Image: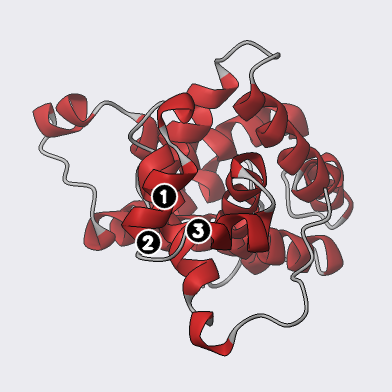
Amino acid sequence: MNMARKAGRPSDDIDARQALIDASRDLFTVMPYNKVSTRLVASNAGVNVAMIRYYFGNKEGLFETMLRETIEPMKIQMQRMVKDSSQKNFLDIMRTYYCEMIKVPLFPRLIAQVMNMDSSETQRKLLEKVFTDVSQPMQSIMFDKLVESGILRPDADPRLCKVSYISLMVFPFIAPPAMLAIHGIELNEEFLNQLFEHNIKLMTHGFLQPTESQD
């Protein structure tokens, strides 16, 4: 699917594209995919439904673009990590993830729900396409580069380290809110900042080589 923006976009609709992406994200994270109509998205975005066809082609194109643009900040940081395999860039992937997901805390849960769907479902196909295009190529070499750069401890298994790293990042967002509440946890920016610093200590004492200073 060609996701390129078309020429000749009306000047008075300059914010329509982003409004549609934001509205679709709000709806797709709380409603089943088949219940989210293009008309509903357009209504919530406050724009004409024709703008969905203009920018995205159809609902599938809108869903795919929403996924891509939500994870774009993490993609950029992963590219930095692949280009320069420093411990700071590695940790900044988690930092970026927390900073972005606190804005859309239901998004990780949407990803988990979609990945549990049958592989024939439209959302599953679109999500796997986005992950294959955006993050999978970099993830496949990221931890290898950490080994080559001496950032991982020599006795650490890169495959298991990846699982631990992803778990530390994602769990706060996919844990049932009632479970977090039982433990007195409120998912907010202050908590995530504290958790990030705590995770740095865990990883440094677990599978990362210690450095003289932690950023």
Q: Residues within 10 Å of mark 2 (few under 14, many from 20)?
A: many
Q: Residue at x 53, y 55 (%)?
A: 94
The location of residue 58, given as percent across then percent down, is 64, 45
Kind of residue at disc 2: Ala
* In the image: residue 188, left or right of residue 95: left
The location of residue 163, given as percent across then percent down, is 62, 30
Kind of residue at disc 3: Ile
Mark 3: which secondary structure? helix
Q: Residue at x 34, y 51 (%)?
A: 195
Q: CA distance from mark 3 to mark 1?
A: 9 Å
Q: Quadrant of residue 45?
A: bottom left
Q: CA distance from mark 2 to mark 1?
A: 6 Å
Mark 1: which secondary structure? helix
The location of residue 109, given as percent across then percent down, is 42, 33
Q: Quadrant of residue 32?
A: top left
Q: Residue furthest bottom?
A: 11
* In the image: residue 70, left or right of residue 126: left
Q: Residue at x 73, y 47 (%)?
A: 152
Compare residues 49 and 188 and report the one nearer the observer.
Answer: 49
The circle on residue 45 is: 2
Compare residues 55 and 194 and report the one nearer the observer.
Answer: 55
Q: CA distance from mark 3 to mark 2?
A: 8 Å
Query: Looking at the image, is mark 3 or mark 1 nearer the viewer?
Result: 1
Circle 2/circle 1 CB separation < 8 Å = yes
Figure disc tally: 3
On the image, numbered disc 3 is attached to which residue?
Answer: 21
Kind of residue at disc 1: Val
**Which circle's residue, 3 or 1, is located before the other in the chain?**
3
Up the image or down, 211 lies above or below 42; here it is below
On the image, numbered disc 1 is attached to which residue?
Answer: 41
